[in-house]
Image (tube, rainbow, N blue to C red):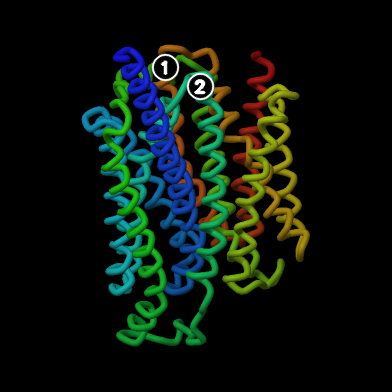
């Protein structure tokens, strides 16, 4: 009787543990959904702030610069914080930073100062960096090693869903109502009052996000003891640059992650203004924002197809083909007009879909003990989302939006070369 009771108790404990782990897994998937969506809300903010503050394209791209420089600045400190706090407490801290950052958008809106939005975005990027450092290894640890890849793929899928939905409804809310007042005719207090009135919707939208983030932080706090504390890997800085210097495949991969993220973000950043141009569809900001969501939907669909295609084709060759498709689509958009120019640029989202994971896997191929350091270098290269859009904005100011597409075209050309290089080296 005692043995049976003990066995039943043990089975009940294991079943409870499995349910708790599933609950934590659902929360982690929610993180992917949220930080994907929040990151790409920047694409909707750019045209809104550009118009309100009479910015040129390069100045408007400071939105992405402020956000993505956080990846370079906070990646290593985030790893050190995670080692000290553990995954769950680190995630709670990340959500706390993000919630406070979202709250800062309200005083930014009432200040009527562009720089205050940049400060909030920089802090928000820091919180997301902390989450990025935590959730990838955590989701791998929530179950057996045999199913780790499927869990990560599942979570990445919801990241893409979050991007599509957040951009889609963000365009409705933030760009939905435009004032008939011409801000360029206002000065002094009248101009400030106009900017405050127009940016209040941004502040209120981010207040809503802050509430959601705070609630998820509370859920994670209560979930911190649901499963056994996971061991956090030591952050290894020493030797990383030596590895970068001696491993040409990794070095080329880091450059390509920099260029890929930069090109993807640059296209999304100009898309709303591009679709509103008389040369393409002359759309109002709200309608153009909805069209932008289809760019990210293309990436989502492509990721679903990518796993199947990678089984049929060498990864390097597939990367080269998708990069070539991105070049062709950008070039078509740049030299055409109307619907062809618009839809060919939107279709670049589909071409982007397999690039990040394929570059990442090719760059780390054959690395064992050095894989964590290589991964850290590749993640730091996401800072390309700060610099390539800025360069694209500068070209747009000098030569126009169509000419600005030469910047992502050059990025994709380098990525295509990496695919060919990786295929030849296999």
Instruction: Give x and y (percent) for residue 262.
Output: 52, 44
Left or right? Give the position of 208 relative to 298.
left
Q: Nearer the viewer, residue 401 or 371?
A: 371
Quadrant in the picture for the N terminus: top left
Q: Is residue 24 visible?
A: yes
Where 13 falls versus 3 (above or below)?
A: below
Q: Which residue sits at x=57%, y=45%?
A: 263
Where 388 falls versus 196 (above or below)?
A: above
Q: Secondary structure at mark 2?
A: helix
Q: Which residue sits at x=54%, y=59%?
A: 167
Residue 102's label in the rendered image is none
Where 63 falls versus 72 (above or below)?
A: below
Residue picked out by circle 2 = 250
Q: Quadrant of residue 138?
A: top left
Q: Is residue 237 visible?
A: no
Residue 243's label in the rendered image is 1
Left or right? Give the position of 385 relative to 3.
right
Which residue is farthest front? 1
User: Across the whole image, how many numbered discs are drawn on residues?
Assistant: 2
Say which label, 1 or 2, has the lower sequence index.
Answer: 1
Gap between marks 1 and 2 measured at Cα = 8 Å
Q: Residues within 10 Å of mark 2 (few under 14, many from 20)?
A: many
Q: Secondary structure at mark 1?
A: helix
Instruction: Give x and y (percent) for residue 203.
Output: 36, 68
Instruction: Give x and y (percent) for residue 274.
Output: 63, 63
Q: Are marks 1 and 2 in contact (CB under 8 Å)?
A: yes
Q: Which residue sits at x=45%, y=25%?
A: 143
Quadrant in the picture for the C terminus: top right
Q: Which residue sits at x=52%, y=31%?
A: 151
Instruction: Give x and y (percent) for residue 272.
Output: 59, 64
Left or right? Give the position of 239 relative to 140.
left
Q: Residues within 10 Å of mark 1 (few under 14, many from 20)?
A: some
């Amino acid at each position: 009787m005692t043995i049976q009771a003990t066995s039943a108790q043990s089975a009940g404990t294991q079943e409870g543990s499995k349910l708790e782990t599933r609950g934590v897994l659902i929360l982690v998937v929610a993180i992917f959904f949220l930080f994907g969506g929040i990151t790409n809300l920047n694409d909707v903010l750019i045209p809104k702030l550009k118009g309100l503050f009479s910015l040129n394209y390069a100045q408007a791209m400071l939105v992405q610069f402020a956000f993505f420089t956080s990846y370079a600045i906070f990646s290593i400190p985030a790893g050190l914080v995670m080692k000290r706090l553990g995954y769950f407490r680190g995630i709670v801290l990340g959500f706390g930073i993000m919630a406070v950052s979202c709250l800062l958008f309200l005083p930014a809106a009432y200040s009527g100062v562009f720089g205050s939005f940049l400060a909030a975005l920089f802090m928000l990027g820091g919180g997301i960096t902390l989450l990025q450092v935590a959730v990838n290894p955590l989701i791998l640890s929530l179950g057996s090693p045999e199913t780790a890849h499927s869990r990560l793929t599942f979570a990445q899928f919801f990241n893409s869903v979050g991007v599509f939905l957040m951009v889609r409804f963000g365009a409705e809310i933030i760009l939905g109502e435009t004032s008939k007042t011409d801000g360029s005719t206002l000065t002094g207090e009248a101009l400030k009052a106009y900017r405050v009135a127009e940016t209040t919707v941004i502040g209120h939208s981010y207040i809503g996000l802050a509430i959601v983030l705070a609630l998820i932080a509370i859920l994670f706090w209560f979930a911190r003891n649901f499963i056994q504390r996971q061991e956090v890997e030591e952050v290894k800085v020493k030797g990383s640059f030596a590895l970068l210097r001696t491993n040409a495949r990794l070095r080329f991969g880091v450059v390509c992650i920099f260029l890929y993220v930069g090109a993807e973000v640059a296209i999304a950043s100009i898309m709303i203004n591009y679709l509103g141009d008389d040369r393409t569809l002359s759309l109002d900001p709200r309608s153009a924002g909805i069209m932008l969501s289809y760019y990210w939907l293309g990436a989502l669909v492509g990721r679903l197809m990518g796993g199947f295609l990678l089984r049929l084709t060498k990864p390097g060759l597939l990367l080269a083909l998708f990069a070539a498709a991105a070049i062709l689509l950008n070039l078509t958009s740049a030299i055409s007009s109307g619907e062809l120019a618009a839809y060919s640029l939107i279709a670049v989202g589909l071409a982007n879909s397999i690039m990040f994971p394929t570059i990442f896997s090719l760059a780390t191929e054959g690395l064992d003990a050095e894989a964590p350091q290589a991964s850290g270098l590749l993640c730091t290269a996401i800072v390309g989302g700060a610099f390539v859009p800025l360069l694209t904005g500068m070209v747009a100011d000098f030569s126009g939006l169509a000419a600005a597409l030469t910047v992502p075209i050059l990025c994709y050309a380098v990525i295509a070369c990496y695919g060919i290089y990786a295929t030849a080296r296999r």
